[in-house]
Image (spheres, coloured by chain):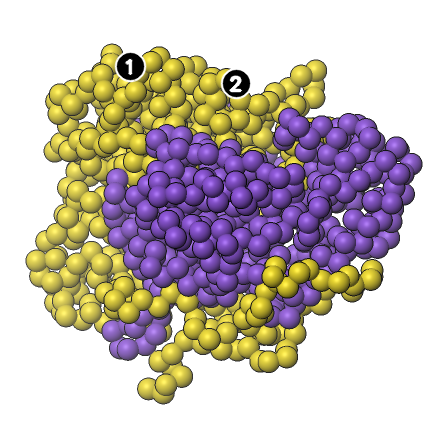
Chain colours: A yellow, B purple
Amino acid sequence: MSVENMTVTTIFDKSQEGRKGLNLPVLDVEAKTTLDSSLLRKEKAKLPQLSEFDVVRHFTNLSNKNMAIDKNFYPLGSCTMKYNPKIAERVAGLEGFSSIHPHVITNNMNEDVQGILETVDMLEKNLCEVTGMKKFTTTPQAGAHGEMLGIMMIDKYHRSKGNKRKYIIVPDSSHGTNPATATMVGYEVITIKSDANGGMDFDDYCAKMNEDVAAVMLTVPNTLGLYNPRIKQLCEVAHKYDALMYYDGANMNAIMGVARPGDIGFDVIHINVHKTFATPHGGGGPGSGPVGVSEKLMEFLPDLGIKKVNDIYEFTTGGKNSIGKISPFFGNYGISLRAITYMTTLGGNGMYNTSSKAVLNANYILNRLKDYFDVPFGNKCMHECVISAKTLAKGGVTAMDIAKYLLDFGMHAPTVYFPLIVKEAIMIEPTETENKQTLDLFCDTMIDAVNLAKKAPADFQHYPKTLGVCRPDDTMAIKNLNVRYEQ
Amino acid sequence: MPYTPHTQTEVREMLDVIGLEKESDLFASIPDDLKVSKLDLPDGLDEFSTFNMFKKLASKNVTNKLMFMGGGYYDHVVPSAVDALAGRSEFYTAYTPYQAEASQGTLQALYEYQSLICELTGMDVSNASMYDGATALAEAALMAVRITRRNKILVDAGVNPTYIEVVKTYLSFRDIEVEVIDMNGEESNLEAVESKIDNTVAAYLFQNPNFFGSVSDFTSICDKLHEHKALAVMSAYPVSLGMLKDPGSLGVDIVSADGQCLGNYLSFGGPTFGMVATKTEYIRNLPGRIIGKTLDKDGKELFVLTMQAREQHIRRQRATSNICSNQNLLALRSTMFLSLIGREGLVTMAELCFNKSEYLKEQISKVSGISVVNTQSTFNEFVIKTPLSASDLLAKLSDKGFYAGVNLSALYENRTNEILISVTEKRTKEDMDQLVTAIGEVL
């Protein structure tokens, strides 16, 4: 193999001294004596020097090295990789939304942004109806940011009653962001184990619950793809001690139009609009994590909102108990806009259908694969299923091997090794937008993998074979840390 | 509009495989008393009616006023190539690059992003981006607390006031003391800062150019902080770094910034992205994703997410932050932007902003009744004092078709007649002359 094939060529390697890309407007005023030299940069930032076409070709070629929903089935559990309707991109690209300066808010020129404020209002109202919560804020910039806001409001709630509580309860099946958020807001974490049915162990939960617990954070349905039938009881137990119930809405795609967190008794919820409401994942962001609250927490909402007075939208500031600001303005507004566009096309009638088909697709996969893999929690699930390669692993083929095998068949891998409580976990979330033919191809490929694993387990070390690179050395990445191009 | 492809026949076939009679049985695990019958929302609209509806809403927002507002969000050029490249769905419909072999496009672009940010800021390492400039500064403060194991943060009052509010919110739940240090007019009171630095201080947070546009030399403050083993944390304006001394040369330990100005739209304040860069020795305390280069099993170079043991999905409650996502697509746009503008282009852009701002400053100070408040050098923003209230003047200029600046009286109690004006490379001499004439007319 030639050296060229063994090394990557970065944008810096393509730089040529003196080459220019972008033309800027010309200077049409007199150039001034520059600033005092103590304030000036001594050496120019070593940015690469390329033509526009060089840059276009470079990044176009890079884009070809990605799998993406538009190209590939992407059954990542807990990530809801559904189709992102193109109309949302078109709407977000309208100059009337994209070119608006946020300090219009500071200047209180609300009359100039009535259209924007109406979209914010539409989104907040839609989310209230879908979740049964009283009021939403769209200021959090991601799910984890929403979690942080939620726990901050809960903290304020307890403090306003003169209590500083110490603990947050999370189940061991939770997303890592839940315990990490608790720490960010200054809490200690109590982890409750899951029982044989995949739900939080009820007796242990009751035993750990006391007046030092500020909140319980639950993902519903949970990360095993299961709906806990005792969910209402869990809320009642917490409320007896005035501990509040936090709903991690990451899996909202399973239950739209079916059951509403607010009706069940939850006090706070965050929604990942990049999951349930089809905004693009962008390769890892931006997302948006609007937060809804029950009556109890309204006074703690962050310091920027809207209200309608005589048919005109106005800005509102937080009340005296507001937690303050977690974002300067309306968070990732451009993402909120895509979400409300999607919701408008989907409508109330489309939401139930969305969840129903998401659950149908996941159950179909689970039932087609249940005889080939270990199935830790039965043959029914909600919008995602968790199977295990525990038995296969004894023969040498792990969940990661299966994941890498799939990549060669034009499919992204499911989430593997999460939730942490299932050995050799493979977490599959097909979403409602995939057709039966794709699901069948996926299941057939998974079954082929199992057959191959039994015949020739050693072969798996060579997958993926078609993507140009195979099996990174992660240990070396940490040991010989190389996180920037050295010039 | 349904986005579900299922035919009736297929639904039946699938239910048979699952062993269910009807589709509603899929929700059997949810107790009946928790179920709702129907959502009170309108039915879904077709694409064309939806687009018309949003087009009408977009037209209710004003886009035709000449922009002189800055304050952390700037009306800079956005090259067409950035839109075209970031608009490729291979980028925008991908997920977090957990499967390295299937994500080399995103991973390499982010490695290039980290490298560009290091060159720009003069720092050793950068993460792969965070939410925005405000939250990045808050994360930088928390990082300084972790590194120094001290829990007192000094914040310069020249930091963007909305950033200060966000920092205060983040820190207020952690028993970390925050002390805001007042300014000398529009410039940092460096003597007051020096007198506050002692062995209990984790970090001093400052912004350069500060919120009022003034540029200062913070080198001696950085030295003083280091004498006390405290850290210098600077919030930067990336475009200004084409001209101004890079934070690394100033002696800064952690740099944060908002990346909106690097090829991203104003979009009512978001999405933008935040950057955090630091020195190699602090990398283990850096929050957020980091991309590294390594070899695959055949010895080929490739890129991976690395040092994940700092992050929430591995470390849970012991993670450096709860952050899960980065603002990947926006960071990607800035990577494309910085590649397009290049080494000389960034200098030109910064000088355009500076020179045009100097021109406007000079012209505007000739208007009778108006004075420029900044006494020291500015980059591309400055503060004027007006005989009218800031709100009145801005409203009158708005009627004449200008967003003349940010109303400082809305942000500070003692700045009732003051406006923050910003100039970018997009404003022409004619634009600026028109603004000056308009101010003369309304006064």
| In the displayed structure image, the side of residue B206 where residue A36 appears, left or right | right
Tag 1: residue type? Answer: Asp
Q: Residue at x 70, y 19 (%)?
A: A311
| In the displayed structure image, the side of residue B357 where residue B137 appears, left or right | left
Of discs 1 and 2, which sits in the foreground?
A: 2
In the image, residue A379 lies at what x, y percent?
19, 39
Chain ID of residue with mark 1: A
The tag on residue A319 is 2
Name the secondary structure under disc 2. loop
Q: Is residue A398 visible?
A: yes
Packing grade of label 2 (10 A; few <14, some 14-19, many >=20) is some
Instruction: Say which of B49 and A154 sits in front.
Output: A154
Instruction: Say which of A382 and A80 sits in front.
Output: A80
Tag 2: residue type? Answer: Gly
Q: Quadrant of residue A160?
A: top left
> What distance separates the C-alpha of mark 1 from that of mark 2?
23 Å
Q: Residue at x 38, y 37 (%)?
A: B152
Chain ID of residue with mark 2: A
Instruction: Say which of B354 and A263 sits in front.
Output: B354
In the image, residue B49 lies at what x, y percent?
66, 36
The quadrant in which the N terminus of chain A is found is bottom left
Q: Residue at x 26, y 40 (%)?
A: B317
In the image, residue A150 lies at what x, y percent?
39, 28
| Residue A237 versus residue B411 in the image, above or below | above
Sequence order check: which comes first, mark 1 or mark 2? 1
Name the residue at the right extreme: B441
Q: Are marks 1 and 2 in contact (CB under 8 Å)?
A: no
Q: Residue at x 17, y 58 (%)?
A: A398
| In the displayed structure image, the side of residue B204 where residue A239 appears, left or right | left
Residue receiving disc 1 = A242
Q: Quadrant of residue B359?
A: bottom right
Name the residue at the left extreme: A394
